[in-house]
Amino acid sequence: MSMVRKFIFVFGLGGLLIAAAGCATTKLRGGKAVPAIVITPDATELEQLAAKEIRRYLYLRTGELPTISQGPTQGDAIVLQTNNTDLQPQQYRIATVNSDGKRTVAITGGDEIGTLYGAYRFIEHFGVRFYLHGDTIPDGPAPLELPAVDEVGKPLFELRGIHPFHDFPEGPDWWNENDYKAIIGQLPKLGMNFFALHTYPEKRPNAEPTVWIGLSEDVGPDGKVAFSYPSSYQNTLRGNWGYAPKRTSEFNFAAAQLFERDDYGAEVMSGMMPEPKTPEQANELFNRVGDMLGSVFEYAHKLGVKTCVGTETPLVIPEVVKKRLKDMGKEPNDPAVVRELYAGMFERIKRAYPLDYYWLWTPEGWTWSDVKDEQVAATQADLLLAVEAAADVGAPFTLATCGWVLGPPNDRRKFDRVLPKEMPFSCINREVGFSPVDANFAKVTDRPKWAIPWLEDDPAMISPQLWVGRMRRDAVDALRYGCTGLMGIHWRTRSLAPNVSALAKAGWEQGSWAEAAHSEPASRLRDLPTEDFYLDWARTQFGPEAAEQIAHIFVGADGAGRLAGRDNRRAGLPRTSEWVDGPGAIRVEPTAWSRQSPQFDFVEKFAKLRGKIKGAGNRERFDYWLNTFRYARSMGQVGCIVGRLDETMKRINAEQNSKIKKRMARNEALGLRRQLAKEWAEMVTYLLAVVSNAGEMGTVANLEQHSMKRLRLLNKHDRALEKILAKPLPTDAMPWKDYRGKARIIVPTVRGNLAVSEDLKLKVIILSKNSPAKAALYWRQMGNGAEQMIPLEHAARGVYMVTIPKADIGGKDFEYHIKAEFGWGRKIYFPATAPDRNQTVIVN
């Protein structure tokens, strides 16, 4: 079908005609009319959102603000409509037609979600790219010329999305409602439609408040619970997973400036850290989380995003609940009682928040331990009890399985033969993602199947990880095995931007790069080619001037090459951290830095390209990655210095002659200790230069609470040295508190979309040597009008708060920037492109 015939066919069905005469339009420079965005008079909320998003991004990209029309218009046009006659749900078509000197781009969806996907795909033709942490808008205005497009988008998997994992501060443990909504709001831009959470049980290491466990009689009509047990999300006063409790005011090298209070964690934990101390507080936490998830999941559903939560199986019953059951004459281990608990859990979810799936995670030990037949039997029995309980309460969601493996070690398909076929089966890859997608997926038949690759792994949690080639490989394998879902497990967001983008794109299209998957056995080749991906990445992130050279560097840093064993995990980027009692401990190296440093030669090659980068946004993104790489290099050097200091102190402690011991301490160990403090400070300074969200603040906490306090990598030899030297260590060996880096503004949570009923509430962090003389937010209606100024309110340390009330917003799309002013006329801005290009917010 020709493009013109396709256009007539689509618009004939929709009944939307583009007339030669119509409403007045604004003018581009030179007198040419701005293309209008046209929707039907009965456009749905999502179709209206699609139109607003196109308007927003064309404004950001070109500086021109198109109108949104519900009727005939003149000149060029972008027409949005939904037509399910020849397109399936989620599918879209973008077709450009030239007629009578006018150009029209028709964006048609098989359903309203498909129309929204088509709108975001159309915007990508202007060089815009989308990620979990936000958007990339290339620097420099582009002409508002409608591109010639003829494409159809069809997802390869029914469900595509993310699985942020609760347990560490780098992930959703530190997310607030605005963080959830900010990230979920990015999913449709990525063509994703799935969001899932896991809940750890009591003593593994602690109960989490995502899912409540209890009886139906303890649930109110609104989902509020009247009986519960202590639970918590990670916070700075809680000590597990290798994080030692530590007040943020004790954080070093100016890291304390990021936090407005000592007991830092998610807002739902406010006033209850490290965990609830009374029954009333225990109930309050579950109720706060229920309210938050209710708001977040309703928002997700409006955007076509499916939601999922779940627990581990067999069900771990909290001790407080066990006691209550026994007091009621019920035996906690009785299958009928377990079924009753599942019914209570499911009834509470029905009343508290909308949910599409509830997944049950099989035991983590099945991925590395021997499993007895009775353990498998207990898990199977528990799964069937959950199925029965869901039927008992008429659960409005579908049960699913997940876990660290697809099924029991001796028979991965065992549960496929006993569980209802409507239940999806899923699992994360083994070996924290170093192993490919489980080939046993191909043997599971007649049911939905979700593959879940690791976008990053937690052993190297505080290190950068680039896995584009691996994401592509896992997507190809998942499709080959007949999987209907493709999701990524993760904690952080911005540092994973390439990985997330690669996984999202591979859920829709697998190009010529996929052919490499068939050229070598899956057991040997782990990563697929990435050159095309990183060339586009470099051009859109940093501009065209050095794109090929930058792409070459990222290609070299990506992936792991061929498979490595569990004790020899390799990566293109050096793995400068590892699991030691918890995620992301700095890796201590016994070898000299001179032998390790060549791995980081690419860092200075990257740095030398900075002079070619043009534009404030491109430079900000370049500096983010440059400082990320420098941070990783400093971490590698810290690990080597710690290793040398450990070895030196071992020799000193073995020396019996006190004079020789003291000389060795003075001439060898003290110099290393000073060098360690200097390099540690440099590492943190680079990290503070990239912190931009809650997850990266969690990385700071990890360094302080894990490597510094729990493992004492910086100061574990201080007492011994001071005793030998008979005096305190010099001040240049001690951490400092003041900020010594470049002044910057951080907005940890950036909402791109807002409901009419919401205020815009922002936390603003200003890192600087001195407090600003003035700090304020400046905002206006998007594209026009005078700016209004709202002063920032100082909370504590480097943290400020500011709110734009919904009454002032008035339901209109708007833009804003933040400016901090210092002495001698010095000013810094957020976003980096302000005041020329502001942060925009769509109200819908």
Image (tube, grey):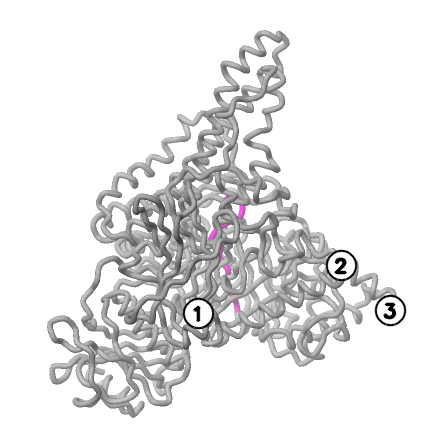
Q: Is residue 455 magenta?
A: yes
Whole-Å distance between the Cαs marked 3 and 2? 21 Å
What residue sits 45% from the left and 29% below the top? 678
What residue sits 26% from the left and 65% below the top? 61
The residue under label 1 is which amino acid type? Phe
Circle 1 crowding by C-alpha within 10 Å: few under 14, some 14–19, many from 20: many
The residue under label 3 is which amino acid type? Met
Which comes before the other along the chain, label 2 or label 1?
Answer: 1
Whole-Å distance between the Cαs marked 2 and 1? 46 Å
Q: Quadrant of residue 132?
A: bottom left
Instruction: Left or right? Give the position of 743 relative to 279.
Output: left
The kind of secondary structure the magenta stretch mainly shows is loop
Which structural element holds mark 1? Answer: loop
Q: Which residue is mark 1?
A: 157
> Percent x, y for residue 758?
48, 72
Which comes before the other along the chain, label 3 or label 2?
Answer: 2
Of the pair 232 and 414, the residue shown nearer to us: 232
Q: Is residue 726 magenta?
A: no
Q: Which residues are magenta?
A: 449-461
Q: How many marks?
A: 3
Q: Which residue is mark 3?
A: 328
Instruction: Left or right? Give the position of 121 relative to 103.
Output: right
> Percent x, y for residue 472?
39, 57
Whether residue 562 is visible: no
Of the pair 519 and 117, the residue shown nearer to us: 117
Whole-Å distance between the Cαs marked 1 and 3? 47 Å
